[in-house]
Image (cartoon, rainbow, N blue to C red):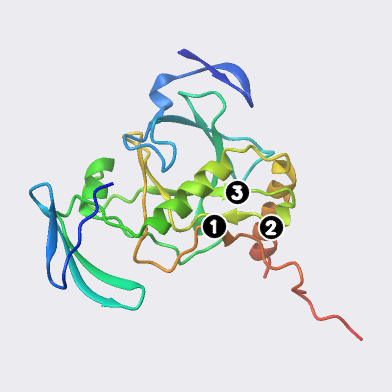
Amino acid sequence: MLVLSRKINQSVMIGDDIEVILLETKGDTAKIGIVAPNDVKVYRQEIYQAIKAENLRATQNPATVDAASSLLKNVLHNRKEP
Amino acid sequence: MMKLATTRFGTFEIDPSTILHFPLGLLGLERFSRYIIIDSDQTAPMRWLQCVDDPDIALLIVEPGMFFPDYAPHLSSDDRGILQLNGDDLPVVASVVVIPDDPQEMTINLLGPLVINEEKRLGKQLVLADSSYSARQRLLPDRMVCETPVAV
């Protein structure tokens, strides 16, 4: 991993068109700004991890699919009644 | 027709034109881009998303709008481009479902929905970074809630 020290308002270029700027530090939190083209997706890493974790959990082929299906059918059925 | 081997459903024939292509894969499963949807009464309203490239990989999905009528994930123009959606065409939305040992506790991923252009057979998993949606949204009403008042 490349480690760089930056002062406030200094930045790092990643390639030709992505700029990461250190805006503010407060205690153990750093506020960073990111300038990137529209087609580059920028997310907090936890969001990625959360979705990835659910995809992988979903591939573990549960044994209780039939019961879950019945429960969902009940919910939908009950909702239709006035 | 082509033969498809799956761990859960055995080997059977599929029409290649029914294959859904996720050019970017699903998060954590980026190696795989081809899936088919398998419907059955036993799993409805959920459907299986069976990977064509790996027989072990099958995920349950459900249309989130059935349970969350206001749910409307936003697609960027890039997303629409990847899906080759024309004009005001709307994609089919499906969310991954996780069923733990106790099915009452099943959850739906509203943070990373799958959007699919059925006509072009193209799909993508969105990341709704600016939303307050959960990746583990409870799908069933809380079991402690009584729908009808109990006479004392």
Q: Amino acid at mark 2?
A: Glu
- Of B21 and B88, the residue lying toward us: B21
Asked if badge 2 and badge 3 are on a common chain, one would say yes
Tell me the subunit letter for badge 2. Answer: B
Instruction: Name the residue located 68 percent from the left edge and 60 percent from the top edge.
Output: A75
Q: Nearer the viewer, mark 3 or mark 1?
A: 3
Q: Position of residue A76 (x, y in %)?
A: 64, 58
Quick check: A45 left or right of B59?
left
Residue that mark 2 sits on: B105
Tell which circle, 2 or 3, labels the residue nearer the N-terminal end. Answer: 3
Q: CA distance from mark 1 to mark 2?
A: 18 Å
Residue that mark 1 sits on: B66
The reply to whether discs 1 and 2 touch (Cβ–Cβ < 8 Å) is no
The reply to whether discs 2 and 3 touch (Cβ–Cβ < 8 Å) is no
Q: Amino acid at mark 3?
A: Val
Q: Image quarter for residue B146?
A: bottom right
Instruction: Name the residue located 65 percent from the left edge and 54 percent from the top edge.
Output: B106
Residue that mark 3 sits on: B98
Residue B49 is labelled as none
Q: CA distance from mark 2 to mark 3?
A: 9 Å
Disc 1 secondary structure class: helix
User: Which quadrant is the N terminus of chain B positioned in?
Assistant: top left
Tell me the subunit letter for badge 1. Answer: B
Asked if badge 1 and badge 2 are on a common chain, one would say yes
